[in-house]
Image (tube, rainbow, N blue to C red):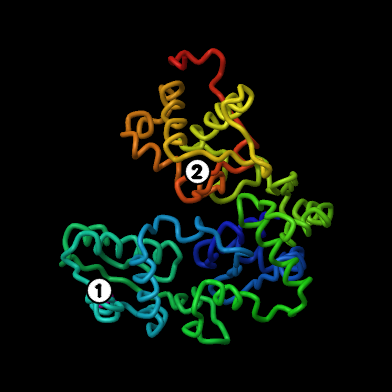
Amino acid sequence: MKELLALLENYIILRERNRELYYSIKDNYENFNDFLNEKLGYNLIFYEDFVKLEKIPGKPEDWMGIEGFTDVKEYIFFMLLLMYLEDKNKEEQFVLSFVTEYISNQYPGEKIDWTKYSNRRSLVKVIKLALSLGIMKNNDGDEDEFSSDENADVLYESTGISRYIVRAFSKDIMECENAKDLMKLNWEGIEQDKGVVRRNRVYRRILLSPVVYNGGIEDSDYEYIKRFRSSLQQNFENNLGWDLHVHKNGALIVLSDDNKIGNVFPSMKGESEVVLLLAKLIREKLKEGKLSLNIDDEIVLRREDFNKLLLELRDKKGSGFKKELRDSKNDYFIDVLLNYMKQFLMLEQRGDSIVLKPVIGKVVGDYPKDYLANDN
């Protein structure tokens, strides 16, 4: 179980960094290989230097992406860095200025100006990601100095792993016209049986998404979850120790404290604490009749009413928030919570409205009764 959890939590596992885990996976992968292949349709890739599980979503979500990346430019920088490294042999050295020159020349539609702080900061984010993944090493220098000085240089070394980071497709992705076309490529190599494709898609959605909502009478995925609930529960329990909860309008995995991975809710983050308190406030307002549920167990609010709800919560409970959220300006506080809740599919924006989704009522929290801060 620990080996599969490690594969899910890490993009890639390098033998050099974690030799014991690498060989443990190699020795024990047959214990969970059927779950990966038959249920998820995933490939487990072994090479001499690393092992990698290709984790493909069943459905693309807005929150999916590289943590820390906030601009499309950063994704382009990353792809251009991978292109630059593709021609580098293992242990071949290069300097940061070679990378900046390559990116500047290859960037589509414009020539990157490295005198701009925002461009340098974005590249430093990309470099740090590449270092954390192990596709390159820092031999001398500090990339953080590049943030403040465009003339700062750093000596790096290629590990030869960069060429295995991006998935290889049998078709040219430039032929894809939209995200839907790209998603179709994710089913390459899978038996084109609708039942197999749907099974893999449902397992992937449950695995990677905070919650899978009931999309209505035409939602075959949710019908599959309800029909095969026992089998789904058993497979996730046996292979990962995870508990599947299925409700009228949503299904989600509930993790115990000893097998939590990745970014989960609830957590020790200050945003998580605020959302738990918000969930309790929402329940109270539902009980008082000040809020109401629609047929899908959603609460639809005007944006200004949602903002007022958050600010009301901070007035009542804010003395216990972390300093950043307690003392921040209203707009910043609201945006942070809005984006955090989006990430966990607790709400969505529909035009000028905020729709609070059913999962927000799953877990609530409050301060202890003997909490001394002013929360009246």
Between 198 and 326, which is closer to the camera in this rendering?
Answer: 198
**Quadrant holding the N terminus:** bottom right
Whether 98 is among the magenta residues is: yes
Q: Is residue 289 above or below residue 231?
A: above
Q: Residues within 10 Å of mark 2 (few under 14, many from 20)?
A: many
Instruction: Tell me the SS state at disc 1.
Output: helix
Answer left or right for 100 relative to 10. Answer: left
Q: Please tell me whether mark 2 sits on a helix, a strand or a loop.
A: strand
Give 301 or 29, whichever is nearer the viewer: 301
Does label 1 or label 2 sit earlier along the sequence? Answer: 1
Q: Which residue is mark 2?
A: 354
Magenta span main SS? helix
Residue 236 lies in what quarter of the image? bottom right
- Mark 1, mark 2: which one is toward the viewer? 2
Left or right? Give the position of 252 relative to 196: left
Badge 1 amino acid: Thr
The image position of residue 114, as x and y in percent, is: 19, 68
In the image, the segment drawn in magenta is: 94-100
Q: Give x and y (percent) for residue 222.
A: 74, 56
- Which of the numbered marks, if any, corresponds to residue 100? 1
Q: Is residue 297 above or below residue 233?
A: above
Residue 232: name its quadrant: bottom right
The structure residue drawn at horizontal position 56% and vertical position 44%, both measured from the top left corner, is 346
Quick check: is 367 in the magenta stretch? Answer: no
Amino acid, disc 2: Ile
State left or right for residue 307 relative to residue 34: left
Res. 4 mark: none
Q: Residue at x 47, y 14 (%)?
A: 376
Callout 1 touching callout 2 (CB < 8 Å):
no
